[in-house]
Image (spheres, rainbow, N blue to C red):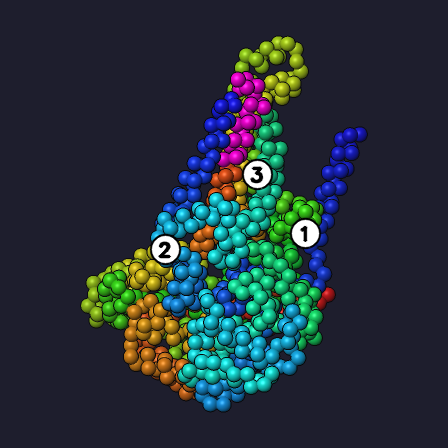
Amino acid sequence: MRRLLAAAMLSAVIASVAGTGLAQAQTLRIALREDADLLDPTLARTYVGRIVFAGLCDKLFDIDEKLNIVPQLATGYEWADPKTLVIHLRPDVLFQDGEKLDAAAVKYSLERHLTLPGSFRRGEISAMDHVDVVDPETVRVVLKTPSGAFLSQLTDRAGMIVSPKAATQEGKDFGLHPVCAGPFRFVERVPQDHIALERFSQYWNSKDIHFDKVTYQVIVDSSSRLANLRAGAVNLVEYILPTDAAAVKADPKLRLVVSDALGYVGVTNNLANGKRADNPYGKDARVRQAFSLAIDRAALVQVVFNGMYAPAMQAVSASSPFYDADLKVPERDVAKAKALLAAAGVKTPVPLELMAPNNPDTMQAAEVIQSMAAEAGFDVHIHATEFAASLSLSEQGDYEAYLIGWSGRVDIDGNIYAFLHSHQANNVTGYANPTVDNLLDEARGMTDMAKRKALYAEMWNQEVQDLPLLYLWTGRNIVGMSAKLTGFRPVPDGMIRVQGLELGK
Amino acid sequence: MRGHLGNRIAQIIPTLLLVSVLVFCLQQLMPGDPALVMAGEERGDPQVLAQIRAELWLDRSLPVQYAHWLGNVVQGNLGYSWRIRQPVAQLIAQKLPVTLQLSGMAFVIAVLIGVPAGVIAAVQRNRFWDYVANAVGLAGLSTPTFWLGIMLILLVSVDLGWLPPSGYVSLTEDWRASLATTIMPAFVLGNAIAAILMRHTRSAMLTALDQDFVRTARAKGLREWVVIVRHALRNALIPVVTLGALELGTLLSGAVLTEQVFSIPGFGKLIVDAVFNRDYPVVQGVVLVTAALYVLLNLLADVLYVVINPRLRV
């Protein structure tokens, strides 16, 4: 009898535990690949943090699927002159603490980005001189110099407007309880686990919001992210591994959305950053051209990423308005590569150390490059290094070639200026070409798209000769979601816009 | 015995001090500039880097940094996370109960499986059940935890839909949901330890069963289960308790892979993320607390010896 009772009790416990539902009422669950950092638009710097901001903080402007700049908290803008940007604000917008969003609040946020100690936005809007409040619904942003990329910066964190009252009260701790003008307000955060937001009922565009809550769940392991999606524990996974994409496609309950991303991956070459540049690869452009010709970029992305990424020869993807269609990805040409090495008069095999962060994808790509380059006469030694250590080594010039990527910015300037222009801190190659510098400077100071594109085309002609940076592929956003989820907009910045998202029956 | 315990307690403070110095020095050997990691993609701005270095005391000498940190620790302040600005003590207070629950459940599962299996294997030496227990034990030892974790998620959560695939709910919030989220990872963790416990229990039991006092007990006409459980097992448990304390200590910081697979926001994940992000205050705080727990667990094992084996009470 006692055994029977024990068995019954055990079954009851198991049944009650097992019955703990997976069902969630009107909660959108989004799986993130890693934990966000501080939730303060001025002090934040991670990619996944921006995904959380997409639910929390609206921006002056947004971008659409085709990278057009569209108004969000603004209703429009005009350039009064090349250095004066006039922004018209949406009336009747409230912050999540009930305060009104007006021109004074916009001025406060932009100036905060520029002056708050430790601000990560300062570099993005360094062209800004000052902000004038014209009237409660109009601000005038005056720049120090004309800037073609300035407006695009306002489509990301630099364009997020925070509540002046909350930001003043909280100071540097604002990121622990952020208050913005987005569709969802901050509720709680358990580091490395989840960030919970709840619907802000007075959101200006509340008709497009169809959830009561949004939870951003941190699931670092890619297999586990996929399993959570398949089990229905999350509705959307912001990053599916290219090698997992087929499993999502094959599942009728799921949907895979793939779109061009803003970033790229390439080989950064040490041309003049310290003693490690003193070798044929660093000093003779023909050797680098030979290396570039030895790599079959299409085969590389096919082998390592199941063909999900796009082979590239430039820093933006084909969907960017700055994409140079004339700059074709070169076909692999081993004979020509060998001829270039012979012309350079180097002894083969040419030894080359390729530094690569030691994550599985990058290591696999490095190995494919190693074997392709070997056929053309290179002896590539892979230096697998933990990411943070590789960054330091590249800064110190303690590398020959470095396989590394960049998450990308809306305007091409954010993808190339700091890397190719001389004396920029992100230019770890030591590359300094006055022609390239002039073209980059000139293009940066213009707002006319056609003229900028022409200048960039000229710049690329020089870059592919010198190859300080050897572009390999541009990324794609691979998003997995429940087939019941509708209204998803694949925007190249990879952010999950919650406006319009809806869960069907 | 009391003197022995007193000695062990007196060793705690110098041990922890040594650990703190070691951690502080060792993390300086880690390649990679923390300021560069903190700056993320804004690392191109020298002003940003200088500001980070000044704010985090990275521009001071190592002894000054250490003295500053130790001074705060003595006052109960473990500092704050460089990455997310939360106090380290708060992070530990959030994560420690999670890992304690997970480790506790894993340990109970390990003991419930490992000790009986070891006893059966010893009693049934070189017979069918011994072979079965050994085979299961070997499988448990040689199965990678991340693989077992993923397989369980696919079977139990994706295919059968019985349990949530990952995440964590605290016991105080909803005990049923808490058990539902932790039972699978606890099993995965406990499985490997059960195998170790099984093998040690088996060998300790075999030694005990050969002893004179067991023969005497049998000669007195005691029932076999009484001989095994009350006489042999009680003596065999001494080395098992030592091992158990060590394994429990390992569980506290060694559950990283399991926590990763099941997205459990525990201690292991906290320290691994902190190392990769060069979040030094978190690394130091977590190592110090883990070391303290380790020392305490071993002290507890010393006390348990005395409880289990009265001969040590002299």
Q: Are marks 2 and 1 on the same chain?
A: yes
Indicate yes or no whether the magenta region holds residue A63: no
CB atoms of marks 2 and 1 within 8 Å: no
Q: Which residue is mark 1?
A: B161
Q: Which residues are magenta?
A: B295-314
- On residue B60, the disc is 2
Q: Whole-percent x and y of residue A201?
A: 70, 70
Q: Whole-percent x and y of residue B203?
A: 52, 24
| Mark 2 or mark 1, whichever is nearer to me | 2
Instruction: Rate crowding at label 3 as few (under 14), some (14 to 19) or many (20 or more) other CA atoms within 10 Å.
Output: many
Secondary structure under tag 2 reads loop
* Residue type, mark 2 in image: Arg
Residue A375 falls in image quadrant: bottom left
Vertical order, B139 against A186 (above or below): above
Q: Main secondary structure of the magenta part?
A: helix
* Residue type, mark 3 in image: Asn
Residue at 55% x, 25% y: name it.
B305
Q: Residue furthest left?
A: A345
Q: Which residue is mark 3?
A: B191
- On residue A165, the disc is none
| Mark 3 or mark 2, whichever is nearer to me | 2
